[in-house]
Amino acid sequence: MACQLLMFIILNLSSNFTTISDSNIMNETHSLQNETETRESRTATGKFTLLLFASASSYTGTDTLTLPSMNLKQLCEHLEQQYPGIGAKILRSSGVCVNLEYVEFEYDGLMQGRKGCGEDVVIKGGDEVGIIPPVSSG
């Protein structure tokens, strides 16, 4: 509703905008509503979205997983159980972000129980977590 009002105000205050059809506005509004409903649904059910980039996506065969709330160590254990070898081949050299913010993470230390390696990172329902392996180009 707020998005519709904002779009209405923007369109009516400026004559420099090109004409946007009602169907485009409705499509954008429905898209935003669906995105909000999906996030609210994940929050209500205690699930988060895991985004897998580059080699993590190739290794797992998917770029997105929906998982129940857990901490970062449990996530690593879960991924290792589902995709044997992912820890040594992918997670060991990857960065992790939660809701677009990088978190302190060191795979080997985390799995051995060392402090300061990400053990205190709790992933809650509605969060978005990214596994970001290093990439290179040339």
Image: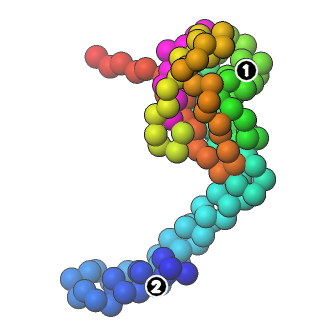
Which residue corresponds to the image point at 64% horizontal and 43% vertical from the top-left?
A: 49
In this rendering, would 107 be left or right of 21? right
In this rendering, would 109 be left or right of 76? left
The amino acid beneath tag 2 is Leu
Q: Quadrant of residue 114?
A: top right
Which region shows up in magenta? Answer: 87-97
Q: Which residue is mark 2?
A: 5
Q: Is residue 113 visible?
A: yes
Other residues around mark 1 within 10 Å, as few (<14) / some (14–19) / many (≥20): some
Which element carries disc 1, helix, strand or loop?
helix
Against 103, is 80 above or below?
above
Residue 92 shown in magenta: yes
The amino acid beneath tag 1 is Glu
Other residues around mark 2 within 10 Å, as few (<14) / some (14–19) / many (≥20): few
Q: Which residue is mark 1?
A: 77
Residue 137 shown in magenta: no
